[in-house]
Image (spheres, rainbow, N blue to C red):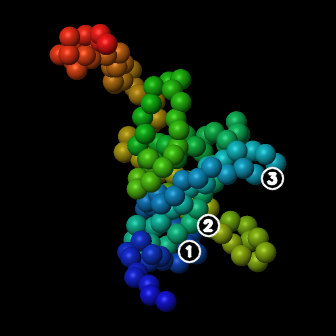
Amino acid sequence: MKFTPKESDLRGGYITEAGEYSFKITKVSDVIASSGTQGIEIGLACLKTGNAMRETFWMSEKAAWRVCNFLIALGVKIRRGDDVEIDDSYIGKEFKATVKMGEPKNGVAYPEIDNFDDGPHGYLFYLAGDEPEQPTPAASTPDKAIEDEGGDEW
C-alpha cells in the first residue's frame, strides 16, 4: 500500500491538563443528544501544541449563556435580535479559554472549557452608534444582454 502523508494528517494528542489555552476551531458539526436536544460540537486544537479537545454547545435556554460567551471570545458582534448560525465558516477562527478537567467518566477525565476569554472587545451586541448601516436592497437593473439584442423578442 502506498501512502503520501499530508500536513493535515498530523495530529497532536489530547489535552490532559487544566490551564489557559489558545485554540483554533478545526470542526463544526450538528449533534443530537439521546434526549433529542440539538447541539453543536466544536473540534478544537491548541495553537501551541496541536493537542485537541471538543466542546459541545446544547441549544437550550439554560445553556444559551455559554454560546454567547463563546461568540464573545471569537470577537463576534451582532445587532440585538439577529440570529447567529455557527457553521463551517467558523473553522480556522481562534479564541482563548480556560480549561478544566471534568468529572471522570469510565475512569477518564475529559477536558471542558470552564471560562471563555473576553475576546477582542468583551461584548456581543453592537454598542449604540457602533452598528453598521443596514444594507439597502440593490435596485434591479435590466439585463444588458437582452437590451443589446433588441429586447427579448423571439
Name above or below for residue 97 compared with residue 49: above
Q: Residue 57, position in %: x, y?
A: 63, 49
The answer to whether one can see residue 129 in this image is no
Inter-mark Cα distance, 2 to 3: 21 Å
Which amino acid, mark 1?
Tyr
Question: Circle 2 is placed at which residue position?
Answer: 111
Q: At 61% from the left edge and 67% from the top edge, which residue is drawn?
A: 111
The answer to whether one can see residue 18 in this image is yes
Q: Residue furthest right?
A: 35
Q: Residue 116, position in %: x, y?
A: 51, 51
Q: Residue 3, position in %: x, y?
A: 44, 84
Q: At 49% from the left edge and 43% from the top edge, which residue is drawn?
A: 71
Numbered badge on residue 14: 1
| Neighbours of disc 2 within 10 Å: few (<14), some (14-19), many (20+) | many
Give the camera-side residue of 22 and 91. 91
Relative placement, left or right, of 14 versus 3 is right
Question: Circle 3 is placed at which residue position?
Answer: 34
